Image: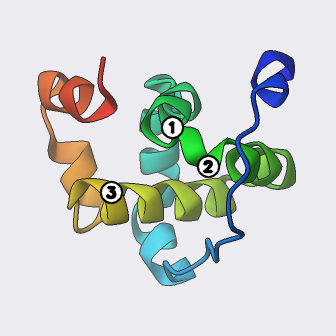
Amino acid sequence: WIQAERNIHPSAIEEWDTVTNEDIISYGGKLFLQLYQDNFWRALFHLFPDKQHQLIEHWKRTRGNDIECATFIVERIRKENNVKCPLDWLNLSPSKRSEILGE
């Protein structure tokens, strides 16, 4: 993260929390653990190079809070990859996940 902070790109502030807590509570723990295991924060840096500053700030604010982290991740997936709900991501094959993450 120190290296990441040296490469911050300026970008507009954006509202992150558009997924309801109910959405996350339904899928939250399992979703967060799965995405964490997939190194999703690292992947987000590759997916959204123009959002590095917000990613860093959000990560700092939410690490340790699985619900908020999951909320943030679900919204990123929905907006950028046409994944309609957390379960869609969980049901993707490992190869499809890698394709979306650009690995």
**Residue of label 1:** 44
Q: Quadrant of residue 16?
A: bottom right
Q: Quadrant of residue 41?
A: top right
Residue at disc 1, secondary structure: helix
- Distance between the Cα atoms at labels 1 and 3? 11 Å
What kind of residue is marked 1? Leu
Q: How far, Cα to Cα, is label 3 from label 2? A: 13 Å
Measure the C-alpha gap from mark 1 to mark 2.
Answer: 9 Å
- Please name the amino acid that badge 2 sits on: Lys
Looking at the image, residue 79 lies above or below residue 15:
above
Which residue is disc 2 drawn over? 51
Name the residue nearer the viewer: 7 or 64: 7
Tell me the element at label 2: helix
Relative to 9, is 26 above or below? below
Which element type, helix, strand or loop, lies under badge 3?
helix
Q: Are marks 1 and 2 in contact (CB under 8 Å)?
A: yes
Residue under label 3, please give it.
Answer: 80
Mark 1 and mark 3 in contact? Answer it, CB < 8 Å: no
Q: Is residue 1 left or right of residue 92?
A: right
When the figure is inspected, residue 58 is found, relative to residue 26, above or below; the finding is: above
Q: Quadrant of the N terminus?
A: top right
Say which label, 1 or 2, has the lower sequence index. 1
Residue 44 % position (x, y): 51, 37
